[in-house]
Every structure is written in C-alpha cells, then in structure tokens.
Image: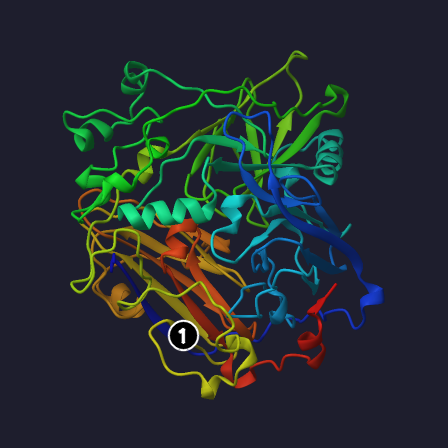
C-alpha cells in the first residue's frame, strides 16, 4: 500500500450566509427527458485491437446532454450490461438532490443488470461538465459523455476582455452557444477488469496505455526505440539509467524509481501490456468551421484514466474563457494542459487562411514519471493508495450496507475515511503528498466547488492555515481559483501539499478522490458527510426508482 497521502480536516467558523437555493423539480413532467441505454459490445471491429467496451445508445462515447441554466433533467439509464453501474455528473453541485450524485455506496445503491434508474436534478450552474460511471473503472471502458449547460441570457460573459469590438463580442457569444466538445482520453487494449487483474497480479502501478483518442477516435503510431529516446522528457534518462523505454513508450515495469521497491511478479504481465505496439490508422475527428463566423468555441473534457494532456491547434491561439464550469479572466495561450476531470473552454479566432489545421494532443508524461514510493509497513501493494490514514477506501460496494446518504449520520461509525461537517462551516482540506518523489494527483470533490488557497513543494508541518500563516506561509485569499478539481504539484526531491477551502452549504454524502481511475479503485478517496446537522432525508420515491424492465 502507498500510504503517501494525508489529509488534515479543519472546520472553520461561519463567515457568510448560505447561498440561495435553486429548487429541484417538483415533478418529472417539468423536466427534460434524457435516456441512455447501456450495453456491452465491440467498439470498432476494424481496429487492430478492437475490444469490448460500454456502448451508450449503441455508440461510444455517449451523446451530449444540453440544458439551459435553471432547467431540470430526468436522466434515465437502462442497464443492459452484465455489471452493476452508477452515473455521476461531474461538477454538478446537486444542491437539494444529493441522491442524484451517482456514487454507489455513498449516494445510492448500484444499478444492477436488467434495472433502470432515473436521476433528476436541476442545472443551477452553467458551464461544461460531463457524465461518467462511478462504479469501479467503467470510465476506462467508455462510459462517459459531455454536458453543456447554456448560461442565462443576461449572464455576464468575459468576452469584452478579449476584444472591445462589438462584432467580435457578438460572434463570440454565438460561438459559445454552438460550443463543440472534445473528450480527450487514453485508451487501452484491455478492459478495466483485465487491466486491474493484470496490475494486481504483477503488483505494479500500471500507467502504460496504447493510444490517445478524441471523442472515441484515434490512431496508434509506433515509433522506433531510437525515435522514442530522442523525444524523451527531461527527467527520463535519470529514471531509466541504462535501460530504454518500452515499445509503447512507457517506463519499464521493472523500473524501481517508477514502481517503487515492491516485490513484483512480472511474469503475470502479458507482452502486450508494455512491449507490443500495434500500429493502426483509425478515424479522424474533424470539425468544420466557417471563417465568416469569425470565432469558434471548443471545450476540451478529460475523462482520461490516468494520462494528462497538452493541447494545441496548429496556427491558432487559444483564448481560454472558462475552466471547470466557471468563467475566468480570459487568457491567450498557445497550449493548454488538461488534467483528469478538467473541462477547459477556448475561443479560436478564425482569421487564418482556410485550410485543415491539426488539433494536437500529447500526454504530459514527464509529470507522471514522478511516482511516490513510500508504503505502509504492514503491506506491500504497489497499486493500493490512501488519501487519509492507512486504510484504502473501498470503492467496490455490493449493497452489503446501505449507502451513506441513506443512513443517519449519528449511526455511521467514525472512520478516517469519513469526514463530517456542520452546515455553513468553512472547511480547509489540507492534502499532503509524501516524498521523496511526489506524483501529481488530480483531486476532485463532489457537490460544491472549492477555493485553491495554497499549494507548494516540501513539508507542510502545520495543523491549520492560521498556524502556517503565522510561520510565514503565504496563501491566496484574494482571488483563489474556484474549481471542483485541482492537480497537486509534482515534486522530485520532496513532498508536496495543497489546501482546498470550501463552505459546507450543500448537505449530503459526497466523495473526495483522485480522478486517476486506478488510484481511485486502489483506494485513494474519502467520504464527506456535509452538514450533518441538516442532513437530507432521501425521498421515499427514490427507493422505488429501481425496477426491472
């Protein structure tokens, strides 16, 4: 087990009143229906390593859910798969509808094969989001799709900070209304269950993938070892020593710096896990734009299992105007970084000669080479992770006990894996990543967003922010990022830390976890019972929403 993460939990005094509630729909007839039929089948029989995956209405990835600000949705899943599932709406606050958060064991029972389930919630915040499975590693098998929530007509947009030309501003508004989504993900020839069993049998932390895909489309290019060596990230030669990257461009599974000093069983690794690169040419993702429109808008969404991405568009600047569902002061860049769970929206000025321009997506693999190697003394599992204490969170719930939301908080046993707050308290989550090598982790919090008030490299030997401030540690309390996900700082020689602050004004049972799928499945999560003094009662009808069809 990698007992490298600790989380300090601090409830602060009430500072502000609760935000205004947006009520959930009072009846299904008022809500927009949205139906997805989940099946288990081949993704594309023409690919070299076509494999079974989760198909959504017969395709992959899933269809786009489009809503307007304030609109209600009845999101129904038909589970025609052989496995249990549950759908999470990434970034959606679920104020007054915590039973719609979609986490088996936390906010609901798992939806079994042959059952359906309806999630009803209100779009109380505009922006780009996505839905995905929150049961084991089903997101690695393709269960995800985009969500676009249009802002209110009178919403303040930041486009005048990009241009003060009224024509430009109007064209940017029109581009935003037609924003296209690109889901950037890694893709592996193994299903999640196969991948997970290989990882456990070999006792490694596997981050080797076959290819990257955009909206389910992509190709596999196999470079020679010489080409891979010539394009290695700066840190790689120090990590490799006299060895070389594998045929798939990965660090070898026997590398102790990358994997840690664990007892491995590399005979359990099939050759295709690391050492076989199979080239194939797949379908291209193409977006046609009309230069007469002046501007186009694209939002990059990452349902990636473990890869972080850098994105560029040949010949074009990217005007970033929204991150994780929030407008920001626009930034003009050549390249954006997209971490697991991120949604980054960009405007592109259509002022170049009409032609085909390539969208380039590359892995930021140099960041993921920095793996933490500390382990708990009683275990030696390279794939097990903890976020608090020494016990991994069990993500695989089989309805042996009711979901946390269905229980009275007073009857839920105390645990390092369950945090509790009072209504409207301000809470600091101090996350410390142990050194000497600290891997970046994209941490996602369900329910309301948080402020990232500080992060850094080195030890954080303080129990509160106030104590750290008194010792000279600086925090951003003026204009901190307000997000639902944040990637911790990588560190080569020592540990790292980040402080997330939020107000517990969204009662319910929620999850805080690493969005790297194998880390979540390996136990890197904690549950949060927010506002236990105003804990919501689950509507009786929610117990009746599951039935056979």
Mark 1 residue element: strand
**Residue 493 location (% of width, % of height):** 17, 44
Q: In the rendered view, does 75 fall on the left or right side of 421?
A: right
User: Image quadrant of residue 461?
Assistant: bottom left
Residue 10 in sight here: yes
Give x and y (percent) for residue 502. Answer: 47, 66
The residue depicted at 58 percent of the width and 48 percent of the height is: 143
Above or below, 5 against 373 in this view is: below
Q: 338 or 255, which lies in front?
A: 255
Q: Position of residue 220 (x, y in %)?
A: 47, 23
Return the residue at label 1: 419
| Quarter of the figure with the N terminus | bottom left
Residue 204 seen anywhere in this rendered image of the structure: no
Furthest residue toward right: 29
From the viewer's side, name the closer residue of 261 and 95: 261
Name the image quarter holding the C terminus: bottom right
Q: Residue at x 55, y 74 (%)?
A: 508
Say if 510 sits above or below 472 in the image: below
Residue 137 placement, left or right of 24: left
């Amino acid at each position: 087990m990698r007992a490298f993460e600790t989380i300090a939990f601090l409830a602060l005094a009430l500072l502000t009143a609760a935000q205004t509630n947006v009520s959930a729909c009072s009846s299904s007839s008022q809500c927009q229906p949205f139906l997805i039929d989940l099946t288990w089948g081949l993704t594309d029989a023409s690919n070299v390593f076509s494999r079974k995956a989760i198909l959504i209405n017969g395709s992959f990835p899933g269809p786009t859910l489009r809503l307007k600000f304030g609109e209600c949705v009845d999101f129904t899943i038909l589970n025609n798969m052989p496995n249990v599932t549950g759908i999470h709406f990434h970034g959606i606050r679920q104020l007054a509808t915590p039973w719609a958060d979609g986490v088996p064991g936390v906010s609901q029972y798992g939806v079994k094969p042959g059952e359906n389930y309806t999630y009803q919630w209100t779009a109380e915040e505009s922006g780009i989001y996505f839905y995905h499975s929150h049961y084991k590693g089903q997101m690695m098998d393709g269960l995800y799709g985009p969500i676009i929530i249009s802002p209110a007509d009178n919403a303040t947009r930041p486009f005048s900070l990009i241009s003060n030309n009224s024509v430009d501003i109007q064209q940017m508004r029109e581009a935003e209304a037609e924003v296209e989504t690109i889901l950037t993900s890694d893709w592996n020839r193994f299903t999640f269950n196969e991948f997970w069993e290989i990882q456990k049998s070999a006792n490694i932390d596997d981050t080797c993938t076959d290819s990257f895909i955009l909206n389910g489309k992509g190709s596999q290019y196999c470079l020679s070892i010489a080409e891979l060596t010539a394009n290695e990230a700066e840190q790689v030669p120090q990590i490799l020593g006299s060895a070389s990257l594998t045929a798939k461009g990965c660090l070898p599974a026997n590398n102790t710096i990358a994997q840690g000093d664990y007892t491995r069983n590399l005979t359990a690794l099939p050759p295709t896990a690391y050492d076989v690169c199979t080239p194939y040419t797949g379908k291209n993702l193409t977006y046609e734009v009309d230069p007469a429109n002046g501007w186009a808008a694209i939002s990059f969404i990452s349902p990636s299992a473990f890869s972080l991405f850098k994105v560029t568009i040949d010949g074009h600047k990217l005007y970033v105007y929204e991150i994780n569902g929030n407008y920001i002061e626009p930034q003009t860049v050549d390249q954006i970084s997209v971490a697991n769970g991120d949604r980054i929206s960009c405007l592109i000025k259509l002022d170049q000669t009409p032609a085909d321009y390539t969208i380039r997506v590359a892995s930021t693999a140099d960041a993921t080479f920095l793996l933490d190697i500390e382990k708990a003394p009683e275990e030696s599992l390279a794939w097990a992770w903890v976020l608090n204490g020494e016990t991994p969170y069990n993500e695989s719930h089989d309805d042996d006990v009711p979901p946390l939301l269905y229980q009275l908080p007073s009857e839920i046993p105390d645990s390092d894996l369950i945090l509790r707050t009072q209504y409207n308290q301000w809470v600091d989550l101090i996350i410390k990543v142990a050194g000497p090598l600290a891997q970046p982790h994209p941490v996602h919090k369900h329910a309301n967003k948080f402020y990232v008030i500080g992060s850094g490299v080195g030890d954080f030997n303080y129990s509160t922010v106030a104590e750290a401030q008194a010792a000279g540690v600086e925090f951003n309390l003026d204009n901190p990022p307000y997000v639902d996900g944040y990637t911790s700082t990588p560190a080569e020689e020592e540990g790292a830390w980040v402080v997330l602050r939020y107000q517990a004004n969204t009662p319910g049972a929620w999850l805080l976890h690493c969005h790297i799928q194998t880390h979540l499945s390996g136990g890197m999560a904690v549950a949060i019972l927010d506002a236990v003094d105003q804990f919501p009662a689950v509507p009786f009808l929610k117990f009746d929403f599951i039935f056979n069809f």
